[in-house]
Structures are given as structure tokens and as C-alpha cells.
Image (cartoon, grey):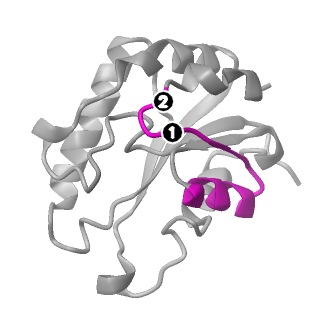
Amino acid sequence: MTGKNKAVFLDRDGVLNKEMGDYVCKIEDFHVLPHNFEVLKELQERGYLLIVATNQGGIAKGWYSEEQLAGMHAHLKALYKENGVEFTDIFYCPHHPNFTGDCDCRKPKPGLLLKAIAQYDIDPSKSYFIGDRERDVEAGTAAGVKGILIDSDQPIADVLNLID
């Protein structure tokens, strides 16, 4: 049975906010990429749910708390909402293999996507995952979603032609 919704899954760092080269630990370092407001609004208007799937191993490392992460995500959602874009949800993996052992949600594993697919009745075959790391594409493929690899901080508009 396939779901009735279609989604564009999005990695966070390097896709929605500026890639810092390491974990973004403080809201002061969290710089949203405004060049993606319009293209994500267009995808939303085309009927796609917009869902963020992000590895946040800095939590396991103790570099920032889940509360600090929630603050960054509230900031992200607010800025996009001001520009007419609403994220359906944000899924994150708080684990890190060196600190918490293995999990099924850390990309390249598909756990975050599978959870979203089940929760929001998504048809993976009509869905996409845009990320700036090979592990994002691998996670998408493992979940039955078409992966689209972009460069860090590259405008999503550059790959819009790959999305039906």
C-alpha cells in the first residue's frame, strides 16, 4: 500500500541554513539561506509536504542540548513561515556512533524518513530527498525516495527540474 501524500525531504545544514563545516551549536551561528524561500514555496504549492531530516550528533557529544536545537528549529520555521513556507515536521537523529552506539535513524540509514513516511501517509515513489551529502541520497534510496545531491549552500532552484 502506498501513501497518498508526496514529500520533499530536506537535509538541514548546507540546504536550509549555511554549512558551517561542523555542528551549528548556537543560534548566532544559524544562518538561514534566503535563496530557498521561493523555490520551497513553489514546491509546497505543488502539493509537496516539506519535511526536514537532519543528523544532530552534537547532542550526543554534549555540544548543545535538545532545547537549544528546538530554539534553532523554531527560528528556522519562523523565518520560512514569514516567507510563506511551512515545514510539515522536522525529524532529527540525536545519536552519534562514537557516543551512543548504533541507531536506525542516523543517515545514511533511512529511519528518519521511514518514520515520516508512516506518520504522514507519504508515497515514497512520488517523493524526493534533497541533501548536500552522499549519506542523504543513500538514506533516501533506502527509504524508496529519489535522492538529489546538491553542493553545500547551493540554491535548490538549480535542481527544481529534477522534481516532477
Q: Position of residue 35 (x, y in %)?
A: 42, 17
Tell me the element at label 1: loop
Residue denoted by label 2: 154
Q: The residue under label 1 is which amino acid type? A: Asp
Relative depth, front residue between 125 and 24? 24
Three-letter amino acid code of the residue under disc 2: Gln
Seen from the viewer's position, the closer of residues 151 and 62 is 151
Residue 146 lies within the magenta run? yes
Label of residue 151 in the image: 1
Q: Disc 1 and disc 2: Cα gap in Å?
A: 5 Å
Residue 29 position in % (x across, y down): 16, 40
Q: Quadrant of the C terminus?
A: top right
Quadrant (top left, top right, bottom left, bottom right) of the N terminus? bottom right
Left or right of 58? Residue 14 is right
Is 99 situated above or below 33? below
Q: Position of residue 81 (x, y in %)?
A: 37, 19
Stretch in magenta:
134-154
Q: Position of residue 45 (x, y in %)?
A: 63, 14
Determine the residue located farthest toward the right in the rendered image: 1
Q: Is 67 placed left or right of 82 in the picture?
A: left
Find out whether the residues at labels 1 and 2 contact each other: C-beta distance under 8 Å.
yes
Q: Residues within 10 Å of mark 1 (few under 14, many from 20)?
A: few
Q: Nearer the viewer, residue 91 or 149?
A: 149
Q: Is residue 162 magenta?
A: no
Relative to 16, say whether 137 is above or below: below
Q: Residues within 10 Å of mark 2 (few under 14, many from 20)?
A: some
Looking at the image, residue 14 sits to the left or right of residue 25; the answer is right
Residue at figure coordinates x 10%, y 37% from the top left: 28
Residue in the image at 73% along x and 40% along y: 127
Quarter of the rendering containing residue 9: top right
